[in-house]
């Protein structure tokens, strides 16, 4: 999110929050008879509405709508780490006009599939993320717990990294390969 957008979002959130606090405080003061000028306000319709049979249902519907709007707002403001498609110049020659695009997620998944085909690797997943403002192709490989030497796996990981760097030549993206140990069936057995 851009800085200006974030500041507008925070300011509007603060204004709405303060307005809701004031509204809640006014409602409490009204209920306790401490609201200034309450005698001059004709609120007979409020008492009639509160006694009506439809009021609890309308209040519940309004609450559900507000909760759903709040959840939608929260989900819309979740940070997105995925990069997706990256565009870059088609050539270093400034006289040639053109742009190329690369889907980093597809490249990461393809490289992960290639790494998963090596002996000692149980599975591998790939994704593209934004890490502190830098585009990163991230591959996470789960190793077979029976593997005793990492020589072949480290060679396969280095080859996969080199393949990604070669295929994404000119694309501003870093490569991260994470190796994690899988659990053996003996370690994951449940005791009943």
Image (tube, rainbow, N blue to C red):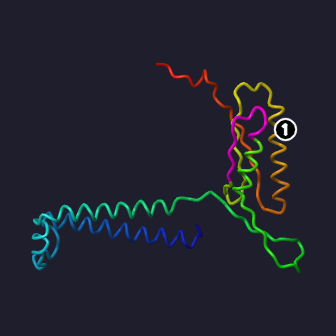
User: Does residue 192 lie above or below 115 as drawn?
Assistant: above
Q: Is residue 100 left or right of residue 92?
A: left
Q: Residue at x 11, y 66 (%)?
A: 52
Q: Quadrant of the N terminus?
A: bottom right
How many discs mark residues in the rendered view? 1
Q: Residue at x 35, y 60 (%)?
A: 67
Residue lying furthest top: 192
Q: Position of residue 188 (x, y in %)?
A: 57, 25
Residue 124 counted in the magenta span? yes
Q: Is residue 2 left or right of residue 45?
A: right
Q: Residue at x 37, y 66 (%)?
A: 17
Q: Residue at x 29, y 68 (%)?
A: 22
Magenta span: 116-127
Q: Position of residue 179 (x, y in %)?
A: 72, 38
Q: Secondary structure at mark 1?
A: helix
Q: Is residue 162 left or right of residue 174?
A: right
Q: Quadrant of residue 33?
A: bottom left
Q: Is residue 89 left or right of residue 180?
A: right
Q: Position of residue 178 (x, y in %)?
A: 71, 42
Q: Quadrant of residue 39?
A: bottom left
Residue 42 counted in the magenta span? no
The residue tagged 1 is 155
User: Does residue 45 lie above or below 115 as drawn?
Assistant: below
Q: Position of residue 113 (x, y in %)?
A: 73, 45
Q: Quadrant of residue 172?
A: bottom right
Crowd class of label 1 (few under 14; some 14 to 19; many from 20; radius 10 Å): few
Return the residue nearer the eye: 74 or 31. 74
């Amino acid at each position: 999110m851009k800085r200006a957008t974030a500041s507008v979002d925070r300011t509007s959130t603060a204004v709405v929050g303060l307005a809701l606090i004031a509204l809640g405080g006014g409602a409490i003061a009204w209920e306790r008879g401490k609201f200034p000028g309450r005698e001059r306000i004709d609120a007979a319709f409020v008492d009639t509405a509160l006694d009506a049979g439809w009021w609890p249902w309308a209040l519940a519907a309004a609450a559900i709508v507000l909760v759903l709007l709040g959840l939608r707002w929260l989900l819309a403001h979740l940070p997105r780490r995925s990069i997706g498609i990256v565009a870059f110049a088609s050539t270093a020659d400034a006289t040639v006009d053109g742009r190329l695009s690369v889907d980093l997620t597809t490249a990461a998944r393809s490289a992960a599939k290639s790494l998963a085909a090596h002996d000692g690797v149980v599975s591998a997943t790939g994704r593209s993320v934004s890490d502190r403002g830098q585009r990163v192709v991230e591959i996470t490989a789960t190793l077979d717990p029976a593997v005793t030497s990492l020589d072949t796996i480290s060679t396969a990981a280095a080859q996969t990294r080199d393949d990604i760097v070669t295929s994404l030549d000119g694309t501003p993206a870093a490569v991260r390969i994470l190796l994690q140990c899988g659990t053996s069936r003996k370690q994951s057995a449940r005791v009943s």
